[in-house]
Image (spheres, rainbow, N blue to C red):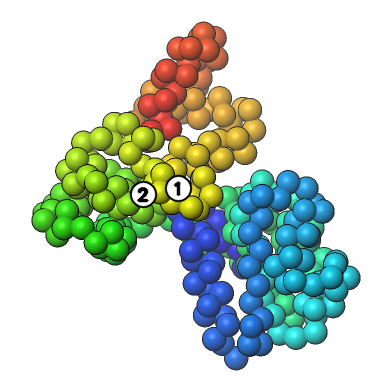
Amino acid sequence: MEIVGPGGVGKTAVAIATGRDLSASDGVAPGGVWLARLEAAATADEVVDTLVAALNVGGEAALFERLKSSATAVILDNCEHVIDAATALAVRLLDAAPGLRILCTSQAPLDIDGETVFELAPLALPDAVALFARRAGAQRTNRTTSASDDAVEDLCRSLDGLPLAIELAAARTKTLSIEEITRRLDDRFSVLSDPTSRRPERRRALKSTIEWSYELLFPDDQRGLWALASFAGGAPLPAVESSRRSRYHEPQRSTWSAGSRVVRW
């Protein structure tokens, strides 16, 4: 199975929750669910080494032996930047251990024969509000209890239901009111970050998440993204093509100035 979706949409959280469900099921041995976070891996060898370290075995041969010896499940998290290596490893593992279950998270499908792809979408407004309430409540401030339901809904709507953005906004309730956070969203890269968090950079700053996704695009796709910078809520293809042609010939300074509006989304 594979969970796909844009950065910040909650793929890792859903994968971990699924892993907990698997560990409680009859089809997986106790302690037989393993999580390998691939965000720091850059090569095929490092992808394998990450899984070897997750299972705490003595090497690749021991890894394959361990996974085929009992009913187990493996979560390969953050495959998008090493998608070829992750795909190759998943295929080899399934060939060696037909009973193995593999769950991958990625911004693009691995395209493995027989895979089931679940595309994760942003949260609907009621779910977004509920997530914000839980995360803000954990800050133990009275700023959220005094906010109106309309104010919270307006904030979550402005964040497009993106779980990471909602969690980062909730973290800001330690020092800002709901209304103050909403007013500052014109500079959301500054407000949607949590400098007190110990999580990896792209899990505690929206700007880093978008940069990670942008760098994975082919150059043509990056230029297409810049072409969309002038439009809010989409645009017809002829307008996008015209914008792309004009922007391609603009000075770099002008392009970046216009583009900064889009990545602010």
Q: Residue furthest right?
A: 61
Name the kind of residue labelled 1 in the image. Answer: Arg
The reply to whether discs 1 and 2 touch (Cβ–Cβ < 8 Å) is: yes
Task: Give the residue at mark 2.
Answer: 168
Q: Callout 2: few (<14), some (14-19), or many (20+) C-alpha neighbours within 10 Å? A: many
- Residue 176 percent location from the top left of the image: 22, 45
Q: Residue 73 occupies which quadrant of the picture?
A: bottom right
- Residue 242 percent location from the top left of the image: 47, 17
Left or right of residue 102, residue 118 in this image: left
Image: 122 above or below 264: below
Q: Residue 122 occupies which quadrant of the picture?
A: bottom left
Q: Secondary structure at mark 2?
A: helix
Q: Residue at x 66, y 81 (%)?
A: 32
- Residue 30 percent location from the top left of the image: 63, 87
Numbered circle sitting on residue 204: 1
User: Which callout, 1 or 2, points at the residue further toward the start of the chain?
Assistant: 2
Left or right of residue 249, residue 146 in this image: left
Q: Residue at x 30, y 53 (%)?
A: 170
Q: Residue at x 36, y 42 (%)?
A: 192
* Visible residue check, residue 247: yes
Q: Secondary structure at mark 1?
A: loop
Left or right of residue 7, residue 54 in this image: right
In space, the residues marked 1 and 2 are separated at their CA atoms by 7 Å
Name the kind of residue labelled 2 in the image. Answer: Leu
- Residue 91 percent location from the top left of the image: 78, 64
